[in-house]
Image (spheres, rainbow, N blue to C red):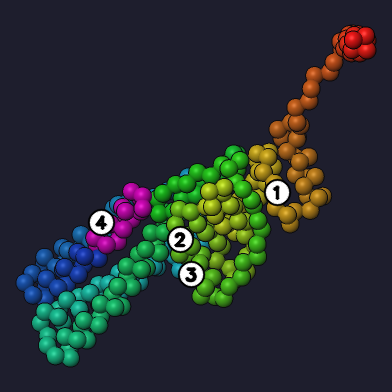
Amino acid sequence: MGKTAKLEFVRRVLPLCLSVLGIVGGYFFMSVLSSLLCLVAAGGIYAALPRPKAPSGAVKPVCEPSVVTLDAIGMVLGIVFFSIALIGMSAWGGAAALAALICLGPASLSLVLFTVAVRQETSWVRFLSNGFEFTQFGLKVRVMYEDLKTIDVRQWEASGWVAWFQSTIGSSGPRSAVLLNGAQSTKTLVFKRSDGAKFTISSELVPDLQRVLINIDRAGVELPDVISDYQRKKIRQRRERMYGGPEREPPVSEEKQVARIAALIEHARRSAGQ
């Protein structure tokens, strides 16, 4: 996890802890003013910390609901249920204390929602002329087109909740990253590197897909099998217009050609004489 992602966790966890401290402390030992100051400080920390900015041209994962909504739900769950759990386990007894202990279950969902929000804020992909840069939880992986082993095009389909989970959670590690558009059916580009790393991206999210394919073809990597011969021809024609055609050998002058033929004939005579 990168420094940016850690800062985003601090943005959410520290205000949550201050809010719970204000409520629990107000119930046991703190004054009303001190409790309010804790709540105000929590809101100030959440709003004041700088937010991460994706670089120009980067594509971020689709987030439904929005990051602010996820944070709001997570804060409400955490503040309410953590406060009830701590107060109940300290001051209540019997069945009430047991019910307070059970509140730790829904309270922990706030941490899951915070993780989802942090992933959305600190994950994106940016396509360059010679490769792409995949960032997840603030950690960057630079993938060069020439290092790719294969590129496949696959139709990805899932039900509503599975599609939401995959597009929202998506990344499962630095060697298998996923960036989907959140739809139940999407056509994906699967980039496989020689070391086994795999990167799956919805083609609908790729800005200027034709330019990406031109840069892949320019790097000498085989284009996906689903691309027809006509499309390959058009891609290579556009590549030659943009970057020029393949290098050609300089034309040989007529005198050099005559000298080369004469040398070949002389060499043949000497070989026959021996």
Q: Pointer 1: residues within 10 angstroms few (<14), some, or many (20+)?
A: some
Give the percent coordinates (x, y) of residue 176: 50, 57
Residue 254 in view (yes/no): no
Image marks 1 and 4: residues in contact by CB distance under 8 Å:
no
Q: Give left or right: position of 59 versus 157.
A: left
Query: Residue at image x 20%, y 75%?
Result: 83
Magenta part of the protein: which range? 1-15
Q: Give left or right: position of 25 versus 174.
A: left
Give the percent coordinates (x, y) of residue 50: 33, 49
Dot 1 or dot 2, earlier in sequence: 2
**Closer to the camera: disc 2 or disc 3?**
2
Query: Residue at image x 81%, y 50%?
Result: 229
Q: Secondary structure at mark 2?
A: loop
**Closer to the camera: disc 1 or disc 3?**
1
- Which residue matches tag 4? 45
Decide: is 186 above or below 57. Answer: below
Q: Which mark is residue 235?
A: none
Q: Amino acid at mark 4?
A: Ile
- Which residue matches tag 3? 165
State whether the magenta stretch is mostly helix, strand or loop: helix
Q: Secondary structure at mark 4?
A: helix
- Gap between marks 1 and 4 measured at Cα: 48 Å
Decide: is 211 above or below 168. Answer: above
Dot 1 or dot 3, earlier in sequence: 3
Give the percent coordinates (x, y) of residue 193: 56, 49
Q: Amino acid at mark 1?
A: Leu
In the current view of this chain or complex, which residue is farthest to the left? 29
